Image: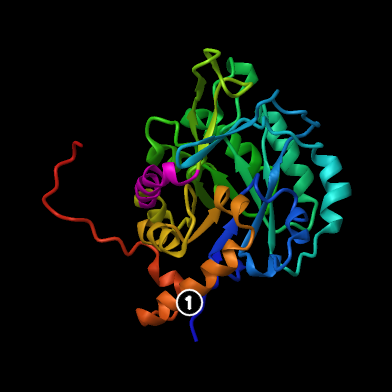
Amino acid sequence: MVDLSVNLAGLIFQSPVAMASGNAGYGIEYQAVSGFSNRDIGAVFLKGTTLEPKLGNKAERVMESPCGLLNSIGLQNPGAKEVIAKYLPQLDLSESQFIINVSGSSIEEYAEVVRLFDQTDLPAIEVNISCPNVKKGGAAFGNDPDMAARVVEACRASTTKPLIVKLSPNQTDIAEGARRVIEAGADVLSAINTLMGMQIDIHTGKPTLGNNQGGLSGPAIKPVALLKVHQIYQVAKLHNVPIIGLGGISCASDVIEFMMAGASMVAIGTAIARDPLLVKKINKDLVKYMKQHNLQKISDLTGKLELNTNTVLCG
């Protein structure tokens, strides 16, 4: 009998495959799909939530791109208090691990949103540090190790729940960024968030997205995400901090690659939007792979990457 469960920061996940924040909504939207069950999902990362309601960015917000998707939703959400009062009571917490994703435009907002969700029954909190700091000209918190650490320190002081910190790939040294947020109190790392990109309409000469730029997700970013997870793992393993890998995952072999690179678990976003039953299929394929390779626990795959020797560091 193979074991697909994983333990991250004391939390048990029935599958190593989660639904990434954004695509999962508030955990109730996909339940209308025939054959879908949250019990097949290791964790459901709920939609990014801020302190006050946000209308999000102007249209267009989502555009297809070769091997990927560009999105510029702008964190549209009803605000933390509304989520707690209206959406959380609709969740059956016995079905899966439901984890809120929080965002903010200031350190103080991050701390307050985390404090509000600390008072709920949700098991953990994911912190999206890729948001713009309005007090610093709009620069993303996650691209500055000092600011990222300050956000995590404030969040850590506002909750006793496990903190999952979602790292931005749009920073100079993601391994150093990982080290700083671990020292600031992160229990788990999540990587990577979307890469920033643009698409231009050649007939109008304008960007196709209303916000001009957006986050690129999907298979196009998988090679970048794999490398980033490998780089982060070199730091995280020294502190026994697990990693949730994401970026272009759409099949069991993708999951296995991320785990070999250092992830203890993965999250899928774009591919689930195309196939809501994908996680159930991946779970079956993972079991098949494990039996073929005489593996008892899926966790045994984490960090099994063996690098080639005598390699040249430049491209």
Q: Secondary structure at mark 1?
A: helix
Q: Quadrant of the C terminus?
A: top left
- At 52% from the left edge and 15% from the top edge, which residue is drawn? 203
For the residue pair 115 and 258, the one nearer the viewer reads as: 258
Residue assigned mark 1: 287
Magenta range is: 218-233
- At 38% from the left edge and 49% from the top edge, which residue is drawn? 226
* Residue placed furthest toward the bottom: 1
Residue 302 in the figure: left or right of residue 141: left
- At 41% from the left edge and 82% from the top edge, which residue is drawn? 291
Residue 7 in the figure: left or right of residue 30: left
For the residue pair 306 and 232, the one nearer the viewer reads as: 306
For the residue pair 17 and 274, the one nearer the viewer reads as: 274
Q: Is residue 143 above or below residue 157?
A: above
* Residue placed furthest toward the front: 203
Mark 1 surroundings: few (<14), some (14-19) or many (≥20) residues within 10 A: many
Residue 189 located within the stretch drawn in magenta: no
Which percent across, then down, holds residue 97? Answer: 68, 62
Which percent across, then down, holds residue 294? Answer: 36, 82
Instruction: Tell me if I can see residue 185 in this picture.
Output: no
Residue 306 placement: quadrant = bottom left
Which percent across, then down, holds residue 212? Answer: 57, 20
